[in-house]
């Protein structure tokens, strides 16, 4: 016999669980539930029929298996599991439902139904699948070009030195594209794995920017753009990883050169700011501004996603891997900094990096 006290004890126990949990009798009615379950389903759950709350076919079938196990008296069988989509705090979430018949010796024929929000696991899995699909797709096109030209060089173009030279040039470009992709993938994986460890070596951003611009001199000359660098001579050193910061500004200036063509000039400023929301103290702000075509605002929130491109064709034609801004974002995060992107169609774009001074 279950007494009122037993139920009170069960309710106290369930309330200590962070995930929604319901104790359901063999008559399918909720004996008691914890506050997480009441928040998810309804404020008053006790006495209501569980099948009115758990209706999705897969979960309902798992419940039925639970009740069948209760009826057979094989109370220790299970647990029975299912996945179901429910809306919690106006957000759709994927839940794993676990239905466990209670042991017979407890004297209460009942099921313990617990739910766990597994949306983030599902999202991470989806991202991993997308990433693998994207990498394979990016690798496949240069490989197809290379194997096509190898065939041609072995066959029809075997005795055609002019065609050979032309094809070898294309093959060289495609091989370079693959090698850029591999080195960007390696950078990304390195930065991601180190993201939790904040770098602490004092770094001068002025030196980082001067080194970046020196390394990009050939591209700057090819692009025919003027680069105006407004340095801040007495800027303090910031805690950082110099090579990674060079990579940040290399990617941003390279993008400004690629996508800012026709805009005449690129401006780079360093500024000191006393307060950035959610940052503990003063910060150094570097703005890389171009006067190119700009970016439609709808793309801005997704620009730092891996392989996200506004115009895939244009990016690939210019040798882009689609990973540059993803690398920038991870490095800035590792430095506990902030990346803001502002852009107006037809006027150009500003990529603003804010890095804390302490
Ligand atoms: P990609 O290798 O394609 O340049 P990025 O991650 O560096 O990859 O940039 C992602 C996309 O963002 C680019 O494909 C481009 O569409 C857009 N983008 C980046 N920088 C600029 C810029 N300065 N002006 C306009 N569009 C830009």
Image (cartoon, rainbow, N blue to C red):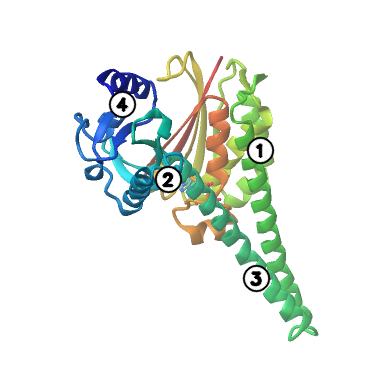
Which residue is under mark 2? 80
Q: Is mark 3 within 8 Å of ligand 1?
A: no
- Per the image, label 1 sits on a secondary structure element best described as helix
- Say whether residue 348 is visible: no
Q: How far apart, in angstroms, are the residues tagged by discs 2 and 3?
A: 51 Å
**For discs 4 and 3, the disc positioned in front in the rendered view:** 4
Q: Residues within 10 Å of mark 2 (few under 14, many from 20)?
A: some
**Residue 113 place in picture, x, y as percent:** 36, 37
Which residue is under mark 1? 190
User: Considering only order in the chain, which callout, 1 or 2, is on the residue closer to the N terminus?
Assistant: 2
Q: Is mark 1 within 8 Å of ligand 1?
A: no
Which residue is under mark 4? 34
Q: Quadrant of residue 155?
A: bottom right
Q: Is residue 74 left or right of residue 21?
A: right
Instruction: Say if mark 2 contacts mark 4, CB within 8 Å.
Output: no
- Per the image, label 4 sits on a secondary structure element best described as loop
Instruction: Say if mark 2 contacts mark 3, CB within 8 Å.
Output: no
- Say whether residue 88 is visible: yes
Q: Is residue 204 left or right of residue 52?
A: right
Can you tell which mark lies on residue 145? 3
**For discs 2 and 3, the disc positioned in front in the rendered view:** 2
**For discs 2 and 4, the disc positioned in front in the rendered view:** 2
Residue at x 34%, y 23% (from the top left corner): 10
Instruction: Say if mark 3 contacts mark 1, CB within 8 Å.
Output: no
Q: Residues within 10 Å of mark 4 (few under 14, many from 20)?
A: many
Q: How far apart, in angstroms, are the residues tagged by discs 4 and 3?
A: 61 Å
**Residue 85 place in picture, x, y as percent:** 33, 46
- Per the image, label 2 sits on a secondary structure element best described as strand
């Amino acid at each position: 016999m279950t007494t009122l006290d037993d139920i009170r004890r069960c309710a106290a126990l369930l309330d200590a669980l962070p995930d929604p949990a319901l104790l359901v009798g063999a008559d399918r009615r909720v004996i008691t539930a914890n506050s997480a379950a009441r928040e998810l389903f309804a404020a008053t759950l006790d006495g209501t029929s569980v099948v009115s709350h758990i209706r999705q076919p897969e979960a309902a079938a798992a419940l039925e298996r639970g009740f069948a196990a209760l009826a057979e008296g094989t109370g220790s069988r299970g647990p029975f599991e299912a996945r179901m989509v429910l809306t919690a705090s106006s957000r759709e979430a994927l839940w794993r439902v676990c239905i466990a018949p209670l042991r017979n010796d407890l004297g209460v024929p009942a099921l313990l139904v617990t739910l766990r929000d597994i949306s983030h696991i599902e999202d991470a899995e989806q991202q991993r699948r997308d990433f693998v699909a994207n990498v394979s797709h990016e690798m496949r096109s240069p490989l197809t070009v290379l194997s096509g030209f190898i065939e041609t060089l072995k066959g029809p173009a075997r005795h055609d030195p002019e065609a050979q030279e032309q094809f070898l040039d294309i093959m060289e470009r495609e091989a370079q594209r693959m090698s850029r992709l591999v080195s960007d993938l390696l950078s990304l994986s390195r930065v991601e794995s180190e993201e939790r460890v904040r770098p602490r070596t004092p770094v001068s951003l002025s030196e980082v920017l001067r080194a970046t611009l020196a390394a990009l001199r050939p591209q700057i000359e090819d692009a025919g753009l003027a680069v105006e660098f407004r340095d801040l001579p007495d800027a303090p050193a910031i805690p950082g990883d110099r090579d990674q910061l060079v990579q940040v500004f290399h990617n941003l200036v390279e993008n400004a050169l690629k996508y800012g063509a026709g805009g005449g000039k690129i401006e780079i400023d360093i500024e000191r700011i006393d307060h950035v929301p959610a940052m503990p103290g003063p910060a150094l702000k570097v703005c890389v501004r171009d006067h190119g075509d700009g970016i439609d605002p709808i793309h801005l929130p997704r620009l730092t996603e891996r392989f996200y491109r506004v115009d895939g064709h244009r990016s690939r034609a210019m040798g882009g891997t689609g990973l540059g801004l993803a690398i920038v974002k991870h490095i800035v995060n590792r430095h506990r900094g902030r990346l803001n992107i502002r852009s107006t169609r037809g006027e150009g774009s500003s990529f603003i990096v804010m890095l804390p001074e302490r």
